[in-house]
Image (cartoon, coloured by chain):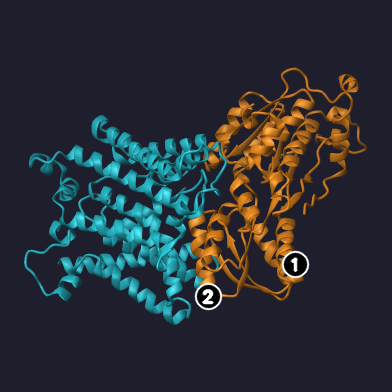
């Protein structure tokens, strides 16, 4: 089962333009100037999640004849991410697609970038009080909702469930809240019996789920808003009889193998490719507002008319049936690129 | 103080009195009190299944705690243990994926972890840097190595042979191998630390390095090998985790060092060196596990759990400190 959610009509238009024949592209205004560079900036830059985002960011850049670069800090540290953002900004790029680790600390750097003429789009996490042009993300509410529906449907709408959480991380909190709200609203016979903080740590997930199972031997399902905890949860499930449906969000090779083996029921995966592709397009468009002349007050009021406040990049539900399509190494091999190293 | 810390007394007292006078008695009392309170609060706490779950949850970490405690006693500290655990996992895992059998891959992983300890030990004892800054650098470098080895992608070790997975997931007559290994490591090092002459030098070096040096102990030699031991045990724990979870993720063990150090200190190890016991440190990590499990069983909101956990631990350590001080006076 694979479900792609709709993105905006703008997305379709832009893709239609970029798929135009080469000859038309030469005459097309949809080309970069020589040296026009767009960068992507993240925290914990070695983590696999970003790679498919950058792959399509890079793809969009190539199609429009632009330069692209992958930047960020390998650490989970907002100061270091801001430093890497500033370093990227010092090279005066045309645009930056940034995943701000925390929203408010990025207000000043983003506003400074906008002030010097660099377009900024946020993805997967936002800095709503800054002057960023657009925000592209998967809808965390919908992710939690879909996960709840998948579990409840599998259980026939009746059973006990638990959640393992990562309190404090906004997108994870939203997924969990949406999951529980959906259960309450649509599946009244699904009963929440336990909550534990696993903080993306397999060992904490193991202990949390084992404790919940002790108190609730009829536990039928557990949901967690990320992938790492599923490793520990699956092990706890195995040791307590293997009757619990383990569902998570995001995927990696290990989770995919566990899904294929039936140890993890499924995962909700944001459509990272669209996040990167549309993220680039939003940046490029924002950098080229001269392409349009809309009937509004943007020019007089000093706003960038080429800005779309929000784009939903969609999601996929990954199960044993489609897991093979989500392996990063196979994808990279198929594409024949060097991933983030180019 | 040294004799008491090492569990020896000059005059043989009755065994129950000796037990009561042990440094760990206060901590045992606190854990028992918590268990009794929890048995009333939740009917699911005092069950074999829950105790097994709690023991399983800290057994592998407990192996790292053993190494950290000995290092703290010698006056050192190792902030790199979480990274080394991860390093052993990802190195062994990638060697296995490259075609090596998992046992040899694990051995290489453990030896490479020991080598990391040796490099840190070199910087401490030969270059003259302190343990804190050396291991801080080690933590970052080794985490970087994990990212280089894995290219940021968790390794799926689903194809590990069942015989290897059994180490982390199997059991002997119902008793998990993980617990057996953990108990063996604890008993061995607790005994050595209390009885073996070689490991007494750890206490002497940690208590007063100059005095130990003047009395003929090669303190740098002791510090070097204890640093190697700590990393080796972390590497050993890493390969057990690999067997247990059938995976090796480059972010595994982030922040683990704080839990490990907290457990050792709760158990009576001093950050200034010279005191601590393996049994105490294991009780420390057991206390952390009991508190975590209790909060989950009581359905305490996840937003409150960390704060309540911190308060309980602060209270427990204060009570233990007070009891210890009263006994000492």
* Left or right, residue A291 beside residue B284: right
The answer to whether mark 1 and mark 2 are in CB contact below 8 A is no
Residue corresponding to mark 2: A215
Q: Chain of mark 1?
A: A
Could you give the CA–CA distance between mark 1 and mark 2, rounded to whole angstroms? 24 Å
* Left or right, residue A278 beside residue B40: right
Q: Which mark is residue B178?
A: none
User: Which residue is pictured at 52% across the width and 42% down the height?
Assistant: A77
Q: Quadrant of residue A302?
A: top right
In the rendered image of this protein, does residue A57 appear above or below residue A243? above
Chain ID for cyan: B
Quarter of the image containing the C terminus of chain B? Answer: bottom left
Residue that lies at the very extreme toward the right in this rendered image: A295
User: Which residue is pictured at 33% across the width and 62% down the height?
Assistant: B284
In the rendered image of this protein, does residue A14 appear above or below residue B164? above
Q: Measured from the top left, where is residue B87 in percent x and y? A: 44, 41
Residue corresponding to mark 1: A153
* Left or right, residue A289 beside residue A103: right
């Amino acid at each position: 089962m694979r479900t792609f959610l709709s993105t905006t009509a703008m997305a379709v238009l832009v893709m239609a333009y970029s798929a135009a024949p080469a000859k038309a592209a030469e005459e097309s205004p949809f080309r970069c100037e020589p040296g026009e560079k767009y960068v992507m900036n993240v925290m914990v830059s070695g983590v696999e999640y970003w790679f498919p985002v950058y792959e399509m960011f890079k793809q969009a850049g190539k199609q429009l004849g632009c330069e692209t670069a992958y930047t960020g800090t390998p650490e989970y540290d907002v100061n270091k991410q801001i430093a890497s953002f500033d370093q990227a900004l010092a090279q005066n790029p045309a645009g930056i697609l940034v995943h701000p680790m925390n929203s408010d600390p990025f207000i000043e750097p983003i506003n400074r970038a906008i002030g010097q003429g660099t377009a900024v789009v946020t993805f997967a996490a936002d800095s709503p009080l800054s002057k960023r042009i657009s925000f592209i993300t998967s809808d965390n509410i919908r992710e939690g909702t879909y996960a709840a529906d998948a579990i409840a449907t599998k259980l026939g709408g009746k059973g006990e469930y638990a959640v393992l959480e990562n309190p404090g991380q906004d997108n994870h909190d939203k997924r969990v809240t949406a999951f529980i709200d959906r259960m309450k609203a649509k599946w009244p016979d699904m009963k929440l019996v336990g909550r534990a903080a696993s903080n993306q740590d397999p060992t904490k997930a193991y202990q949390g789920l084992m404790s919940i199972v002790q108190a609730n031997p009829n536990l039928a399902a557990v949901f967690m808003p990320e992938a790492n905890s599923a490793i520990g949860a699956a092990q706890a499930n195995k040791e307590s009889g293997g009757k619990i449906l383990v569902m998570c969000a995001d995927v990696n090779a290990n989770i995919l193998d566990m899904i294929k083996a039936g140890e993890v029921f499924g995962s909700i995966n944001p459509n990272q490719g669209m996040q990167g592709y549309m993220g680039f397009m939003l940046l490029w468009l924002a950098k080229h507002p001269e392409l349009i002349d809309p009937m509004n007050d943007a020019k007089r009021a000093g706003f960038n008319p080429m800005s779309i406040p929000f784009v939903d990049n969609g999601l996929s539900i990954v199960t044993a049936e489609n897991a093979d399509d989500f392996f990063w190494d196979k994808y990279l091999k198929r594409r024949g690129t060097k991933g983030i190293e180019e | 103080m040294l004799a008491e810390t090492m569990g020896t007394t000059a005059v043989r007292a009755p065994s129950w009195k000796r037990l009561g006078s042990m440094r760990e008695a206060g901590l045992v009392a606190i854990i028992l009190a918590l268990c009794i309170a929890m048995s009333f609060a939740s009917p699911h706490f005092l069950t074999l299944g829950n105790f097994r779950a709690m023991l399983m949850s800290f057994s592998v970490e407990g192996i790292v705690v053993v190494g950290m405690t000995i290092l703290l006693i010698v006056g050192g500290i190792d902030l790199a243990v979480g990274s080394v655990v991860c390093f052993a996992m990802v190195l062994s895992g990638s060697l296995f994926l490259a075609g090596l059998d998992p046992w040899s891959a694990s051995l290489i992983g453990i030896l490479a972890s020991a080598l990391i300890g040796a490099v840190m030990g070199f910087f401490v004892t030969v270059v003259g840097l302190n343990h804190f800054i050396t291991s801080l650098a080690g933590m970052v470098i080794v985490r970087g190595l994990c990212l280089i080895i894995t290219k940021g992608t968790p390794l799926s070790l689903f194809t590990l042979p069942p015989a290897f997975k059994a180490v982390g997931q199997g059991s002997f007559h119902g008793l998990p191998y993980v617990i057996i290994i953990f108990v063996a490591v604890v008993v061995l090092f607790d005994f050595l630390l209390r009885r073996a002459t070689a490991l007494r030098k750890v206490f002497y070096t940690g208590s007063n390095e100059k005095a130990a040096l003047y009395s003929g102990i090669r303190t740098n030699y002791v510090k070097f090998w204890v640093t190697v031991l700590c990393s080796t045990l972390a590497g050993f724990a890493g390969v057990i985790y690999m067997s247990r979870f059938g995976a090796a993720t480059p972010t595994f063990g982030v922040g683990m060092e704080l839990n490990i150090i907290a457990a050792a200190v709760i158990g009576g190890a001093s950050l200034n060196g010279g005191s601590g016991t393996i049994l105490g440190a294991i009780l420390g990590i057991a206390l952390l596990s009991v508190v975590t499990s209790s909060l989950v069983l009581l359905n305490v909101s996840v937003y409150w759990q960390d704060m309540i956990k911190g308060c309980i631990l602060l209270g427990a350590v204060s009570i233990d400190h007070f009891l210890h001080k009263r006994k000492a006076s």
